[in-house]
Image (tube, grey):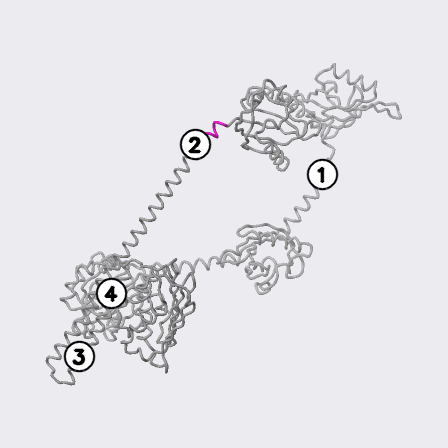
Amino acid sequence: MKLPDNKLAHNLGDENRYLSLIFQNSSDLICLLEVRKKTKLYILAVNPSYNRAARAFDPKLNARKFIGKEIRDIIINDYHLTQQQAGEILSHYKLVIKTRKEHAFTEEIMYKGKMHHYSSIITPILDNDGNCTHLLYSSKDLTEKIDYQNRLESSEKKFRALIENAHEGIVLYDDQGVLIYASPSIKNIAGYKEEDLVGKLGTDFIHPEEFEATREKFKEVLSKPGKSVSHRFRLKHVKGHYLWSEATLTNLLHKPDVQGIISNFKDITKQKIAEDQLKENNQLLQNINQNINEGIYRSIPGQKFKYVNNAFLKMFGFGSMEELNKVRSATLYVDQNQRREVHKTILENKAINNIEVKFKRSDGSEFWGLMSSTLIETVDKEHYFDGAIRDITIQKIAEAKSKHSEQLLASISQNITEGIFRTTIQGGIVFANEALVDIFGYDSEEEMVNIDPNQLYADVGSRQEIINSIIKDGFVRNKEVKLQKKNGQIFWGLYSCSLTKGIEGQDVFDGAVRDITEIKQTEDKLTQLNEELRKQNMALATREEELNLALKELSDRNFELDQLVYKTSHDLRSPLTSILGLVNIAKLDRHPEHQTEYLGRIEKSILRLDEFVRSMLNYAKASRTSVKIQKLALKELIESCVRDLEYLDNFIKVKTTIKIEGKDKALISDPLRLKIIFSNIISNAYKYINPNVELSYLKIDAKLTASKLTTTFEDNGIGIHKSQLDKIFDMFYRATEISEGSGLGMYIVKQSVNQLGGKISVSSKIGKGTTFKIIIPSIK
């Protein structure tokens, strides 16, 4: 990088404010050094980040100690490094002074017991004669990054140790069920090494009886990204026998760092054997006690019990039959009159069936029992009562609650404001409460149950639609329906209904209706207000978008203006300075031959100046002139652009061909902007010919349709590197070092294409040529 002389540097002032902000606010450590006597380095300035780093090393260090001092003295005296260490550091600076090239390197500095790592760059600053006058040192602290990498490596080692010694096995499948990873812990479970498993199907190690179930589980988890399923199966051990395993499959195919289905599994063989044994025992107990819901007994009439089962003892609260027989059987009845009646009935009828009797437990609590008993006479003429008792206390309580609920429902139905009803599909209204009668304006429940239910709907089809929904789903909830009163008045009702079965098994609809006419009217008003508010918000959003676009355009224009002022001052002054220099030389050198050479060079500078002025005029026209539409003759326009460039040196070296398809179609567009676009592209084809080809050419192909103009410019010039293709449309960008243009040409082309609503694309290859394709819509 070139350093201007001291006077010019002093006058830069505000123009370098951005560099100053970067210098002051950069997190990198930046130091500017002056080179004296080619080897001595003195610090001119350090940024705050550099100053903070120095203070972290030694709180006594600050910028005032550095400025104006030789860097060797600071390294040795302030940073307390040895002569050898100082020599190693200064060798980087000497290399840059010698080579005059930027040099990047890494540094490691130990302070406060910790090694700090830095990535550093030294950049030479050269004067106009190419001498290195200053060095710019910048360094980035990499300590935290390297520490993080070390911690990550340590964490990975711990994780691998856990995986290798875990009691669970971990495998990773691809989406076809092929094993792509197996944890070392599998060897402890099934005896396999990783290489024994990877590349094989997981089902190869599953017991044949679990094969299909395992495949189904795999399909299930495959269809649920991010989800897990559990599965039990028999896993084949490396020695040939099978062990029971429980696995959890988790689909992480969608995770880029996994891309597989993880299976965590463990050996549950002992657990499975215990579970099977427990299941067998439970089944045996279930078979033995399958009839213990009822208390079974055999008793000697008026005496003791000969046999009772566990359910009987539990029902009456006794621990054993011996304990039961210590009390008189008559004491088990709450009502002794009922006991005598039961006893008499059995003796007379030989049996009783499902008699409700109130019994008493050993603790004095009472319960209802459903009793059945038969009088048995043995061969020895002994008599027994064989019977069963079922506790129906809960049933009796439920019946009482049901009766209470019926009374409550009747009370509620007559006092709530919602209309309650029961209807059938064929028989019409079965029940209607007073509120329903009032809502529909009828005189009585009797009147309402005798009408056709279709009369209650403003639209008869609405009732059938509701019936279909109830039959399909079993219910409807909060459905808004237009209903009709007895006097014909229409109102909105909120309708809920469910399908149930009547006493005789027929389908009945139980439901409720509430008048929501006032609520609907309020909702309609709110909807209107919300719609008005939405329209106002949309209008405000549109206005805001327009303002943002205007602000962006203004910002772009201001940026372009700043660039334009800077570039104009530079590109106007450069050729003028060259001309003045040549004029002064010509005055001193009167030799006629030299005068001709000086005039030629002056002419070349004037032509450069003329080209820049024309570029600026084109920029002004393209930017400030409004689009003017007219009917154009395409061929004459292209030929005119070519003729205007006959003055260029390479014009006669390039074979130019023009091909136009669709000449009969009319082109309606802006002639000024089309000429700017065509002229800039054609002139570049003439300027940048390839000296290594025998015949340079420019092919112009235009295809005109009713809706658009597609124009292709193909040349075999020097070409453009692919890294520069995206930049050629930037303001003041030159794609080649041999360019003497203003850098505005392609920028103006892009702006003009955009103003015409068109598109431009470019493809190029170094040494082969460049092709531009432009599509301009025909304005109707």
Instruction: Give the amino acid at mark 2.
Output: Lys
Instruction: Give the amino acid at mark 1.
Output: Leu
Q: Is residue 316 above or below residue 123?
A: above
Q: Please, what secondary structure does the residue beneath circle 4 have?
A: helix
Residue highlighted by disc 4: 616
Q: Viewer-nearest of labels 1 and 4?
A: 4
Residue highlighted by disc 1: 285
Q: Viewer-nearest of labels 3 and 1?
A: 3
* Magenta residues (range): 517-522
Point out the image quarter for the C terminus.
bottom left
Between 244 and 464, the one nearer to me in the picture:
464
Q: Viewer-nearest of labels 2 and 1?
A: 2
- Left or right of 275: which side holds 670? left
Q: Residue at x 72, y 18 (%)?
A: 331
Instruction: Give the amino acid at mark 3.
Output: Leu
Q: Earlier in the sequence, mark 3 or mark 4?
A: 3
Q: Horizontal and vertical percent for residue 334?
A: 70, 17
Point out the image quarter for the N terminus.
bottom left
- Left or right of 670: which side holds 589? left
Q: Horizontal and vertical percent for residue 74?
A: 20, 65
Magenta residue check for 520? yes
Q: Can residue 118 be seen in this view?
A: no
Residue highlighted by disc 2: 525
Q: Is residue 305 above or below residue 549?
A: above
Q: Distance between the residues labelled 1 and 4?
A: 103 Å
Sort mark 1 into few (<14), some (14-19) or many (20+) by Cα contacts within 10 Å: few
Q: Please, what secondary structure does the residue beneath circle 3 have?
A: helix
- Left or right of 376: which side holds 120? left
Sort mark 2 into few (<14), some (14-19) or many (20+) by Cα contacts within 10 Å: few
Residue highlighted by disc 3: 599
Q: Horizontal and vertical percent for residue 481?
A: 55, 31
